[in-house]
C-alpha cells in the first residue's frame, strides 16, 4: 500500500496558497467522550519515517510519531475538540466540523488553505478542499490524524481512571460488549453522548 505524500500540499502551493494545513478528526463513532480534531502545517520537504494514517499504525507507533510531531518546532499544529454537550446539542457531524474549525483557526500562522479529510465541510471558516481517504494520501492529514487520535486516547485514559467500570482506556468510548454491559449495570456518566441511540435506549424505563 502506498504511503501518504505531499502532492496535495504542493498543488495548493502551486495554486497560490503559501500556508497549507491538513485536518482530520478522531472520535465520531464512540458513545462517550469528545470528538477531537487536529490541524497541521508541515514544512516543505518534511519527512518522518513511518508517518501514515493513524488507523494503519499500532498504538505504540502512534505514540512515537505523536511525540516526534509535538516536539518538532517546524511542525505547526493545533488540536481542538467539541464536547459531549455540543455533540448532543448540534449532532455529531456539526460538532466534528466545529472541532475542525477550532483547530484550524487557532493555528499560527493561520492557514491560507485547509485540506480536510473526507467529504466537503460546508461553511468552513477558512478556504478549504476535501480529500476522501486523505489520511492515507496526504502527509499533513496523516499527521493530523495521529495528533487527533492520540490526544483523544489520552483523554479517554484519563476518564478511565475516573470511571474504571467502563473500560474507556481499552474501548476509547466505542460500543464494545464490555462497555454496553457496563452501561446496563452502572448507568451512564456525564461523558456519555445521550443523543446516540445505544445510550438513549439505555435510559428508557423498563416495561410499558
Image (cartoon, grey):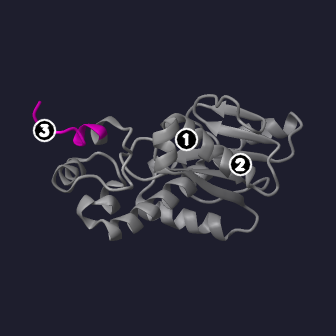
Residue at left offset 46%, top offset 49%: 84
Q: Nearer the viewer, mark 2 or mark 1?
A: 1
Residue 202 x, y percent position in the rendering: 23, 42
Q: Is residue 203 magenta?
A: yes
The CA span between labels 2 and 1 is 14 Å
- Callout 1: few (<14), some (14-19), or many (20+) C-alpha neighbours within 10 Å? many
The CA span between labels 3 and 2 is 45 Å
User: Residue lying furthest right in this view?
Assistant: 16
The residue closer to the viewer here, 184 or 148, is 184
* Residue that numbered label 2 is attached to: 104
* Residue that numbered label 3 is attached to: 206
Residue 162 x, y percent position in the rendering: 34, 69
- Overall secondary structure of the magenta stretch? loop
Residue at left offset 59%, top offset 59%: 49
**Region of the chain picked out in magenta, as a range:** 200-208
Residue at left offset 20%, top offset 54%: 182
Residue at left offset 89%, top offset 37%: 16
Mark seen at residue 95: 1
- Callout 3: few (<14), some (14-19), or many (20+) C-alpha neighbours within 10 Å? few
Residue 2 visible in the picture? no
User: Residue lying furthest front in this view?
Assistant: 208
Q: Is residue 72 left or right of residue 192?
A: right
**Tag 2, which secondary structure?**
helix
- Callout 2: few (<14), some (14-19), or many (20+) C-alpha neighbours within 10 Å? many
Amino acid at each position: 500500500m502506498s504511503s501518504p505524500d505531499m502532492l496535495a500540499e504542493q498543488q495548493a502551493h502551486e495554486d497560490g496558497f503559501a500556508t497549507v494545513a491538513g485536518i482530520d478528526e478522531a472520535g465520531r463513532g464512540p458513545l462517550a467522550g469528545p470528538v477531537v480534531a487536529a490541524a497541521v502545517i508541515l514544512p516543505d520537504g518534511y519527512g518522518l519515517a513511518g508517518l501514515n494514517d493513524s488507523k494503519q499504525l499500532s498504538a505504540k507507533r502512534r505514540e512515537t510519531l505523536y511525540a516526534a510531531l509535538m516536539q518538532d518546532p517546524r511542525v505547526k499544529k493545533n488540536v481542538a475538540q467539541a464536547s459531549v454537550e455540543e455533540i448532543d446539542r448540534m449532532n455529531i457531524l456539526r460538532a466534528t466540523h466545529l472541532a475542525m474549525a477550532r483547530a484550524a483557526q487557532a493555528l499560527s500562522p493561520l492557514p491560507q488553505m485547509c485540506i480536510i479529510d473526507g467529504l466537503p465541510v460546508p461553511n468552513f471558516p477558512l478556504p478549504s478542499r476535501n480529500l476522501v481517504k486523505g489520511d492515507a494520501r496526504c502527509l499533513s492529514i496523516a499527521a493530523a490524524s495521529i495528533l487527533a487520535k492520540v490526544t483523544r486516547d489520552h483523554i479517554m485514559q484519563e476518564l478511565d481512571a475516573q470511571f474504571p467500570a467502563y473500560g474507556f482506556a481499552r474501548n476509547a468510548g466505542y460500543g464494545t460488549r464490555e462497555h454496553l454491559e457496563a452501561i446496563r449495570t452502572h448507568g451512564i456518566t456525564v461523558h456519555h453522548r445521550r443523543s446516540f441511540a445505544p445510550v438513549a435506549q439505555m435510559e428508557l424505563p423498563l416495561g410499558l
